[in-house]
Amino acid sequence: MPTLTIDGHQVTVREGATILEAARAAGIEIPTLCYREGLPPQTSCMVCVVRVNGAEGLVPSCGMIAREGMVVESETDEVRAARRMAVELLLSDHLGDCLGPCQLACPAGMNIPLMIRQIVAGDRAAASRTVRTRIALPSVLGRICPAPCEKACRRASHDEPVAIRLLKRWVGDEDLARGGCWRPESAPPSGRRVAIVGAGPSGLAAAWRLRADRHAVVIFDEREGPGGGMRDIDHQRLPPEVLAAEAQVVLGLGVELRSGVRVGRDVVLDHLRRDFDAVLLAVGEVDEATAAELGVPFGRRGLEADRGTHESPIAGVFVAGSAQSPSNLAVRALAGGREAAQAISQWLAGEEIVPAARPFNVTMGRLDEHTAALMAADASDHPRTEPSDGEPIGFNDEEATREGLRCMHCDCRGLSKCLLRRHAIELGADARAFDGTRRGFERDGTHPAIIYESGKCIACGLCVRIAERHREALGLTFIGRGFDVRTAVPFGESLAEGLRAAAIECAEACPTGAIVLREPPEMREEVAGADD
């Protein structure tokens, strides 16, 4: 049995084992795209390259047999640069969106396509979790938000945007009506206490997130009830009972509200700093006089604070919402409160505060009329739904489902398991490093279990080999040559005919989301992870 050295670690493996297998035996992770255990190595993606002593150039670790005395380097700058270039070349011809434009346009970053799929599937509990993980007040925002997400909705390039705001409102209203609001799981308290000044959208959103992180929270507000400036919105547009009910969901997590208390007058900031482990100022838009009363320096537009970490110049004091950056959008204030709460939790844990970064994304960009029509072909052709009882009432169940079916699902349903995206992030790849003409958009939804988008296929061959192993009569094959090669069913037959037995395994093995299950894993499991 050969013994070799990988990144300074000696490992002994069976005869015939590859360098990739040896690395995994040594606990060293080498990225792969075209490799799957149990199948012969494809050596096509070149993401698993390593440097081997005596070898000319870099070699694919999945196909190179381990030999006695080999010295392998898998994490040098040279190796990482080669892997990064391999990923960037694949991305240059990758046609598809990681995240839907609607999600990117949402200041709170809510996973809108997932929410819509869950609504259509009738899974209210999952939809509630998806929404409230990012937006603590969906019934409120479902009435007052100007819906920047709808302005980005690609359905508008075909006819009219999906009524996302009304769908979000439906989830929130259903929660309130049925008492089924998703709440963060209870866990042992952290033992840390946070004071929030201001019970508006920013303060309530921060309280929701801080309670999820197990911290005790006390909100101070000069008004006699929660809601902040939202209490002044026209009552026909935002009924007080809706605002009160949504605020109560947050307070019901064990958040204490001390109403009628003005910080700077009734209690000073230094006393809050003495009695609490951290303080968040979410008081809405302020002027220099208010900043002086609070005892916090006034910046160019609001209270002085770092835009990324939300830290003020005073230790342990953070700023969020319009107090930091004036805005008339409640959804921006809410997003700022959530970000500030995340920063506070990192600070309380003694960790470096890492500001929320814009997620890695590959995008198709603006669609032409032809591509929009192709993408819309898998969605309902029903025109935009209007609530039968009018805007003040909102959607009923049937209308919510009907409107949800109009979604074109621009996002990648295989996002949670896409290895191409994962390695791009890990390697610091630039999705636009290489410009070129990409393939045209195609989406095959004719199979009852899977969906295939050929523009995301990297011709790794895994699905071809899996179909062979299942002894499919037709299976899949490579069609075309060079840059025009694509994976398809032979003789122009349908995907359902080609994959009678192997479809599910093909979807599970696909490294890029080209073949995905109609019901992706996140529909069946808890929403979490990279985009939370």
Image (spheres, rainbow, N blue to C red):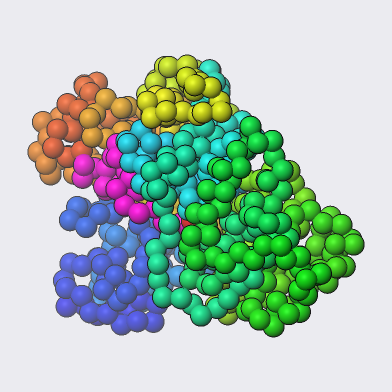
Pinpoint residue 316: horizontal percent, then vertical percent: 69, 76
Please tell me in which quadrant of the rendered image residue 271 appears. bottom right
Task: Say whether residue 183 is visible.
Answer: yes
- Residue 481: x and y in percent read 35, 31
From the viewer's perspective, is residue 97 above or below residue 319? above
Placement of the N terminus among the 4 image quadrants: bottom left
Examine the structure image and report whether residue 514 is included in the region drawn in magenta: yes
Tell me: 521 left or right of 473. right
Near-viewer residue (90 or 111): 111
Marker count (numbered):
0
Q: Residue at x 23, y 23 (%)?
A: 494
Residue 497: x and y in percent read: 17, 26
Q: Camera-side residue: 452 or 269?
A: 269
Range drawn in magenta: 504-530
Q: Residue furthest right?
A: 289
Which residue is at the front of the view, 309 or 14? 309
Q: Is residue 64 above or below residue 180?
A: below
Q: Is residue 116 magenta?
A: no
| Residue occupying the point 76% across, 65% down | 262
**Can see residue 360?**
no
Say which quarter of the image contains residue 396: top left
**Residue shown at the point (56%, 25%) measured from the top left:** 391
* Foreground residue among 328 and 491: 328
Instruction: Tell me residue 194's x, y (percent).
Output: 61, 72
Q: Is residue 409 above or below residue 76?
A: above
